[in-house]
Image: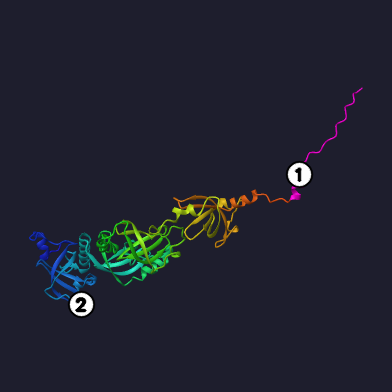
């Protein structure tokens, strides 16, 4: 049934007197006419009166608290006319829309901003920015906050991330989509920009001195001049090592050469500052030598053997015994020092092959010395004996 007594606002809509009539979802600016504990009334450009009430009053922005008559404020249109003929408005939605607008500005401008850490999960940190919940992935943390955990233990990583709850971090918005309510921020991006000027002072080949800040399975991190680089396990020493902690300790001062720069990633080498001992390995060891070696590690495929602190060799399982050996630890164990025969040397590949089998074969091929009596007896036995002449055949009758 049509309303027989149209309101002034309805008359305006019907007459089309105002061309810019707000519709549902629009953000409008109104002047506070009066406020109470449960509602606030706004004058919407002299067109109509708007009311904000109930849950739509509550926005996390301080802009909407303690409003006084005469102040201008923005609100979102929820209904062009409610049961009382007033425009139904919301501070809550207006606050969110404004927040997303500000986030889009931060994204396009590249400005940095402080965020608060709310929660943590195994993938990263839940953050709050402009009253919008966002995500800071682990991969986007700066080196100072990146959880370097030996073995990549996910539970230990989560413990480290949880320790950041409640603190603030300076970040940059790197992805924002209001439709999907997606907000991604990066602390690493801010850190990278801060390092650009410092990093420009270094080139590949530069020698740096720094402090070991972390040791992981794959290598060690070294901090120098506010920068941080990675020494991969293969670049720590010329000899094979099981774990970087066998050589390096957190807090230790080391020297290294920069061997790679990729963006903010710096790759270092400690062994490049040390003479390669394999260059002169053939002056110390030769194929056929019998050497003493200490077994460093026992693997199903053989033994890693230390001949000296700089040169390590491999005794492959095929060189341990002529017989099938399901468990090579039955032959020798880690820490034992035994004799090996050098069977191959490849200086360029940093490889030296050792053999137990070849050592045993040599021993078996060499007969034990005989006594004079044994030799004489053997000669006597081997002398041919004279045979008697055979009798002539008798003719058959």
Q: Nearer the viewer, residue 109 or 314?
A: 314
In the depicted structure, whether residue 290 falls above or below residue 99: above
Point out the stretch of residues depicted in magenta: 372-397
- Is disc 2 in contact with disc 1, using a CB cutoff of under 8 Å? no
Depicted 61 relative to depicted 385: above or below: below
Residue at horizontal 21%, vertical 59%? 108
- Dot 2: element: loop
> Mark 1 sits on what residue?
379
Regarding residue 47, the answer to whether it shows in the image is yes
83 left or right, relative to 167: left
From the image, state whether disc 2 or disc 1 is nearer to you. 1
Q: CA distance from mark 2 to mark 1?
A: 127 Å
Can residue 82 be seen in this snapshot? no
Please tell me which residue lies in front, 264 or 373: 373
Quadrant location of the N terminus? bottom left
Q: Quadrant of residue 163?
A: bottom left
Q: Position of residue 309 (x, y in %)?
A: 48, 61
Q: Which residue is mark 2?
A: 37
- Helix, strand or loop at label 1? It is helix
């Amino acid at each position: 049934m049509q309303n027989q007594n149209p309101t002034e606002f309805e008359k305006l809509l019907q007459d089309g007197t105002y061309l810019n009539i707000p519709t549902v979802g629009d953000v409008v600016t109104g002047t506070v006419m009066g406020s109470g504990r449960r509602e606030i009334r706004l004058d919407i450009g002299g067109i109509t009166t708007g009311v904000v009430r109930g849950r739509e009053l509550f926005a996390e922005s301080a802009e909407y608290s303690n409003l006084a008559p005469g102040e201008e404020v923005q609100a979102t249109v929820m209904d062009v006319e409610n049961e009382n003929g007033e425009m139904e408005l919301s501070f809550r939605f207006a606050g969110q829309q404004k927040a997303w607008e500000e986030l889009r500005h931060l994204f396009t401008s590249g400005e940095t901003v402080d965020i608060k850490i709310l929660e943590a999960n195994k993938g990263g940190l839940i953050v709050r920015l402009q009253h919008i919940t966002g995500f800071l992935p682990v991969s986007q943390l700066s080196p100072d906050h990146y959880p370097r955990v030996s073995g990549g233990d996910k539970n230990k990583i989560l413990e480290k991330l949880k320790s950041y709850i409640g603190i603030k971090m300076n970040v940059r918005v790197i992805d924002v989509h209001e439709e999907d309510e997606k907000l991604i921020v990066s602390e690493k991006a801010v850190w990278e920009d801060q390092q650009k000027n410092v990093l420009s002072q270094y080139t590949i080949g530069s020698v740096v001195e720094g402090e070991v800040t972390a040791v992981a399975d794959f290598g060690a991190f070294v901090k120098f001049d506010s920068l941080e680089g990675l020494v991969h396990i293969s670049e720590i020493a010329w000899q094979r090592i099981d774990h970087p902690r066998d050589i390096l300790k957190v807090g230790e001062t080391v020297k290294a050469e920069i061997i790679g720069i990729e963006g903010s990633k710096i790759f270092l080498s400690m062994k490049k500052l040390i003479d390669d001992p394999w260059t002169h390995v053939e002056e110390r060891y030769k194929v056929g030598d019998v050497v003493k070696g200490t077994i460093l590690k026992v693997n199903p495929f053989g033994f890693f053997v230390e001949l000296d602190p700089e040169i390590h060799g491999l005794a492959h399982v095929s060189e341990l015994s002529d017989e099938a050996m399901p468990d090579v630890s039955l032959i020798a164990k880690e820490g034992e020092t035994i004799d090996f025969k050098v069977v191959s040397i490849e200086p360029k590949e940093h490889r030296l092959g050792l053999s137990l089998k070849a050592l045993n074969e040599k021993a078996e091929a060499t007969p034990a010395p005989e006594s004079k009596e044994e030799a004489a007896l053997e000669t006597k036995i081997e002398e041919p004996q004279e045979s008697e002449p055979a009798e002539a055949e008798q003719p058959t009758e």
